[in-house]
Amino acid sequence: MVKKLTLLVLSYLLVLVLATLFTNEGGISQFNAYILLVFVMLLVCLNPWNKSWNAIIVFASAIIMFSFGQPILYVLIDCALVFFIFSCVDIGCKYTIEPCLLRFTRNISLTIIIISLLGILSPALYIQSDDGERYGGLFHAVNFSANVFGILGICVWEIAKLSNKSHKFLLFFLVTALVLYMEACGTRSLLFFFPYWLFQVYTLYRHTRYGRFLLGLGVLGGVLLIPSLITFLTTKLRFHEGESSLATRALLYYELWTGIEDNYIILPHGAHGAQFLVERFTGHDFYSPHNDFLSYLYDWGLFFILILWSVFLRLRRAKIINGNMVLILVALSSSALHNMLFSMYLWIPLTIIFVINNDTSEKRYRSCCC
């Protein structure tokens, strides 16, 4: 199992390197289907026939049945995605990981974070958008880079927490890095990550001598900064017209929800149905739903809710679900605003987070020098 997880981590890092070196503006998204196929083939080897296959077959069969008349490629991609989701959860619930691989994952992730911050100084990594230049990150796509940056930061901290060291400087660095990165890229969804980091600060300082004083000072500072925060959000939320504006997305959300209601929130419209609806409504193929919760509810109907519920039950049985994990999942849910809710670029680090928090891992990592 150690070698299998090592292969998974190395494959993920290789994809990130390729995304950095061999893609231009727009990033690696145009290769998503091929990369998903590669990871599916890898997960078939890592996670052979098990109980999860029963759920995979049921949900994949339902998608195929309700996607009659849709292009076969999109149907196959959705079936592959179902397999990918359940395989990641199954690995996260059952596997353990060696301390050496944990250290390697932490160090590489931290290196990517540091290089991403240094990249803010490079004009070549900025991308022109509706509201001016925004930092595109190492992967040449603003929101893609931001979400990878966010999940890698959480991964680094979750590994660091396994040791008995306080890591106060690391926590300060990761929180500051997130603030700086969000300011540079202007990705408003990174705000979903802050509840997780505030909880980490609270957890680390609540038992210290000056913990309550520092927390009180932080709350007071937050109150005093509310006027500045409102100004900041007004800029970052982008109310103006354009493909990324709130007004445009709200209109698309309304159309999606109307279609969902027409099918009684139960019956699927079939694979890729939400994207087809948006293209018909706007008359352009560069618009996208920008809300995976509505998109998958439109495409998969009741089966999407059942998939989420099944994933939740598996995580709960493995004793992975707690307040900390809920905040991680809240942060991850922000990626739904960028069509990345089930993205392999986010779910591989999330799988490692599941592994180090599952019940089978027990306390074996506490003694390692992470």
Image: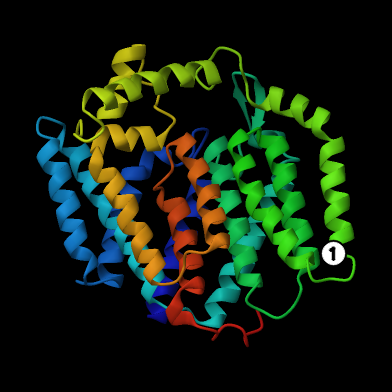
Lateral position of residue 220 relative to residue 91, left or right: right
Residue 171's place in the image compared with 163, above or below, is: above
Task: Identify the residue at image location x=73%, y=48%.
Answer: 118
Q: Is residue 323 left or right of residue 172?
A: left
The crowding category of the residue bearing disc 1, from other C-alpha atoms within 10 Å (few below 14, some 14 to 19, many at least 20), is some
Q: Is residue 233 visible?
A: yes
Which amino acid lies under the numbered mark 1 shown in the image of this protein? Answer: Gly
Q: Which residue is mark 1?
A: 211
Which quarter of the rendered picture does the N terminus lie within? bottom left
241 versus 366 height, above or below? above
Q: Quadrant of residue 298?
A: top left
Q: Residue at x 51, y 36 (%)?
A: 24
Q: Where residue 186 sits in the image (x, y, percent)?
A: 66, 32
Give coordinates of residue 300: x percent, y percent. 24, 39
Q: How many circles with numbers are drawn on the protein?
A: 1
Query: Residue at point 10% right, 30% down?
Result: 69
Q: Residue at x 19, y 51 (%)?
A: 59
Which is nearer the eye, 303 or 284?
Answer: 303
Q: How is the image coloured?
A: rainbow
Where is residue 232? Give x, y as percent. Answer: 75, 28
Comparing 87 with 19, the one in front is: 87
Q: Secondary structure at mark 1?
A: helix
* The quarter of the displayed image where residue 340 is located: top left
Q: Is residue 21 something one can see in this rendering?
A: no
Residue 317 shown left or right of residue 321 in the figure: left
Tell me residue 177's x, y (percent).
73, 50
Quarter of the picture containing the C terminus is: bottom right
